[in-house]
Amino acid sequence: MANRVPRKTVYAVTVIALLALAGGWTLAAGTTQTTGPTQNSSITVTAPNGFSTAVVQSTQLLSVSGVLISGLNGPAGTQAAGAGGGLNSTSTLNAVLNTCAGAFCEENFSAVAGTAALALGDSALQVMLTVSQPTSGPVGFDVQVEIIFLTTGPGNIYAFGTGYFDSSTTSAHAPAFFAVALYVDLGVPSTQMPSVSDIVVTMNNCQTATTCP
């Protein structure tokens, strides 16, 4: 059973700001949404088979800005045709993280095979991942995000986004701390004031650094 997480923790505005100051994070710019229906939110992270390459650091609901879109490193890999957008993809084009020369690096990606492409003015969920970039032997891993939310109308709405990554390697003497931001568009304008109730993040190791599964 998932632990209940207060809304302020889910949006994590203060936490992200503090981490940015402490660790030198450079996040893609967006407009943080602070209005919406009252809610209790929960985050569930599933990491089958002892997955440890990446962990979820925080999540935040944003209104997509032009600066955010222009600051993306690109889509988070390529979803194979006909795979249904899930983790059982046969994609062979994972997004390769840059080689990190120091203890900390960061990149921003838009989700693939999602509900909608990242669009100006839409609401999007930013999922911050911490990846341990190895000194040798790059690791492939995939991430799927499911979001359940409400808008001003009745009934739950669902959004999905997927990422396929190649960890690459660090040129430092110790594994690098690599911050990866994955943006999942909810498919609705931010003016509809979506309120997230649940977030489920599933992460798996890939067969190789460049091939999932």
Image: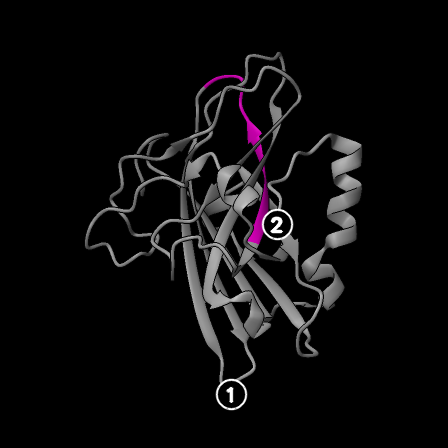
Q: Residue furthest left?
A: 82
Residue for point 50% across, 19% down: 99
Residue for point 49% across, 85% down: 155
- Residue 140 location (% of width, % of height): 40, 34
Q: Which is more toward the observer, 152 or 167? A: 152
Task: Give the quarter of the figure containing the C terminus.
Answer: top left
Is 88 left or right of 61, judged from the image as shown? left
Magenta: main secondary structure equals strand
Circle 1: element type: loop
Note whether 75 is above or below 44 in the view shown. above
- Residue 67 location (% of width, % of height): 56, 42
Disc nearer the start of the sequence (2/1): 2
Rounded to the nearest whole Å, what is the CA distance between mark 2 and mark 1? 27 Å
State which quadrant residue 84 falls in.
bottom left
Residue 129 covered by magenta stretch:
yes
- Residue 86 location (% of width, % of height): 33, 56
Tell me the tag on residue 175: none
Is 74 left or right of 53, judged from the image as shown? left
Q: Is disc 2 surrounded by few (<14), some (14 to 19) or many (20+) residues within 10 Å?
A: some
Residue for point 60% across, 22% down: 175
Number of numbered discs: 2
Note whether 201 is above or below 66 in the view shown. below
Tell me the tag on residue 30: 2
The residue at which mark 1 appears reads as: 154
Note whether 22 is above or below 170 in the view shown. below
Residue range corresponding to the magenta coloring: 126-136
State which quadrant residue 6 falls in.
bottom right
Q: Which is more toward the observer, 213 or 98? A: 98
Task: Give the quarter of the figure containing the N terminus.
Answer: bottom right
